[in-house]
Amino acid sequence: MTPAEPTPRSGECRLGVLAFGDSITNGGGELQWGVALQSWALWTARALGLPYTGYAMDGARVGDVVRRQIPDFERRTPRPEARHDVGCLYIGVNDVRGLDWDPVIFAADFGRALRFLRDRCDRVVTLTAPLALGSPPAGPKVADLNTVVRDKAAAVGALVVDLSGFGARNHVMVDRVHPTAFGQIAIAERVLAVLADDGLATAVAPSSLIAWHQTRWGRLRGDLTYVYRDAKQRVRGAVERRRLERELRA
């Protein structure tokens, strides 16, 4: 990627933002203080003033991107010859939390997905995963995932957004995986900052497009709800850890 803005040829069409990934990129979920939970990639498109096309699916792994989402795009797109302004890929959270995590297999498919976007998009952006991912925690495997993401991105000239330290309480749900509505906006604004450094200016900040109001009682109720859900998640995580330990011993 170069900082220079591409100059479209006469009659050349740009189709905005194209996104692949899992539930984090698919978006959707509960309101947070009245703010709808929308995909970070959609917020990115809105902030750039560009149209949005998303193929992300809940529960997806990198193999789903290569063998389902990309073929779906190829079948459905009305303009197969057209280019996109920005290609987005955030995948690996479900892969690295699985017992069958294999960084070599992941790297091969992740590289294919990035190359597909590079060939069709003026800029490609991908994201690392939070190191404190999951409950129970995914552990050191996340660092391995992030190394693959950075290496494969460098190989194709993709931009990388660092989410390794992402995890503020109002940005991530109690499962330590899914962003809240505010978390999605925070991710989008990190993405936009990286794109701006590469020469693609933001038209409007996503945080300026929302309106919310929090009362003292609403904040207390939110805190109590979080504590309750966090306790449930910790119990569930402990049960899951014991199950995994039994499977490993078997």
Image (cartoon, rainbow, N blue to C red):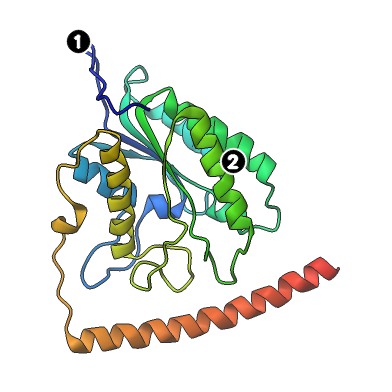
Q: Residue at x 14, y 75 (%)?
A: 213
Which image quadrant for residue 227? bottom left
Of 168 and 15, which appears nearest the observer? 168
Of 56 and 180, which appears nearest the observer? 180
Q: Is residue 56 above or below residue 211?
A: above
- Which quarter of the rendering shows the N terminus? top left
Circles 2, 1 touching at the beta carbon (< 8 Å): no
Of mark 2 and mark 1, the one earlier in the sequence is 1
Of 139 and 172, which appears nearest the observer? 139
State left or right for residue 96 relative to residue 120. Answer: right
Element assignment for label 1: loop
- In the picture of the structure, the residue carrying the numbered disc 2 is 63
Look at label 2 and name its amino acid: Gly
Which image quadrant for residue 36? bottom left
Q: Estimate the x, y position of residue 88 in percent, counting from the top left.
A: 39, 39
- In the picture of the structure, the residue carrying the numbered disc 1 is 10
Q: Residue at x 53, y 54 (%)?
A: 93
Look at label 1 and name its amino acid: Ser
**In 3D space, how far apart are the residues under numbered discs 2 and 1 (Cα atoms)?**
37 Å
Residue 154 showing in the rendered view:
yes
